[in-house]
Image (cartoon, rainbow, N blue to C red):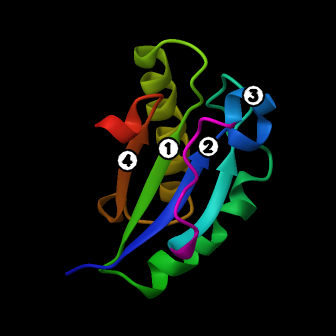
């Protein structure tokens, strides 16, 4: 079985407090990095390259591992919009990881919107 590592792409830290209360917290034990996005944005923050370095290093040391980009959105807006935003965020992180040298086949995307826990 191949090892899985987790890189979280979320907006929880930059959301209004009321909206962030409903976002499920990622499992911390296997999280390599957190990339926080501005509210309603899929643009990588300026520090994204440094934030993803632990995941890049892990991928290099564990060639059979998969890096799971676990994308979350807040409950503000419609479910279809939030799912699309989560996908765009995950793709932004995936692009940064591949530019940093992580093979695309090593990256798995998991997307969660408002109703992610019910999927």
**Mark 3: few, some, or many residues within 10 Å (few <14, many ≥20)?**
few
Q: Secondary structure at mark 1?
A: strand
Q: Circle 4 is placed at which residue position?
A: 110
Q: Are marks 3 and 4 in contact (CB under 8 Å)?
A: no
Of mark 2 and mark 4, the one earlier in the sequence is 2
Pointer 2 local density, CA inside 10 Å: few below 14, some 14–19, many at least 20: many
Above or below for 15 versus 80: below
Q: Which residue is mark 3?
A: 18
Q: Earlier in the sequence, mark 2 or mark 3?
A: 2
Circle 2 sits on which residue? Answer: 10
- The 10 Å Cα crowd at callout 4, few under 14, some 14 to 19, many 20 or more, is some
**Distance in Å between CA atoms under marks 2 and 1:** 6 Å
Look at the magenta stretch and give its main secondary structure: loop
The image quarter containing residue 39 is top right
- Which sits earlier in the primary sequence, circle 2 or circle 1? 2
Is 97 situated left or right of 65 in this image?
right
Residue 75 among those drawn in magenta: no
Residue 2 image offset from top left, x and y in percent? 25, 79
* Residue most extreme to the top: 78
User: Which residue reaches farthest bottom?
Assistant: 61
According to the picture, the residue beneath numbered tag 1 turns out to be 71
Query: Where is 118 relative to 62, above or below?
Result: above
Mark 4 falls on what kind of element?
A: strand
Q: Secondary structure at mark 2?
A: strand
Q: Are marks 4 and 1 in contact (CB under 8 Å)?
A: yes
Q: CA distance from mark 2 to mark 4?
A: 12 Å
> Residue 22 location in percent, x, y?
60, 35
């Amino acid at each position: 079985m191949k090892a899985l590592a987790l890189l979280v792409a979320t907006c929880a830290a930059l959301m209004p407090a009321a909206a962030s209360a409903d976002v499920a917290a990622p499992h911390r034990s296997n999280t390599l990095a957190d990339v926080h996005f501005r509210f309603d944005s899929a643009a990588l923050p300026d520090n994204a390259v440094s934030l993803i370095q632990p995941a890049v290093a892990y991928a290099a040391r564990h060639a059979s591992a998969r890096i799971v980009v676990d994308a979350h959105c807040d409950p503000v807006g419609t479910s279809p919009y939030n799912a699309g935003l989560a996908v765009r965020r995950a793709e932004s992180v995936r692009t940064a990881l591949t530019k940093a040298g992580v093979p695309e086949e090593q990256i798995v995307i998991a997307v969660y919107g408002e109703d992610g826990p019910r999927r």
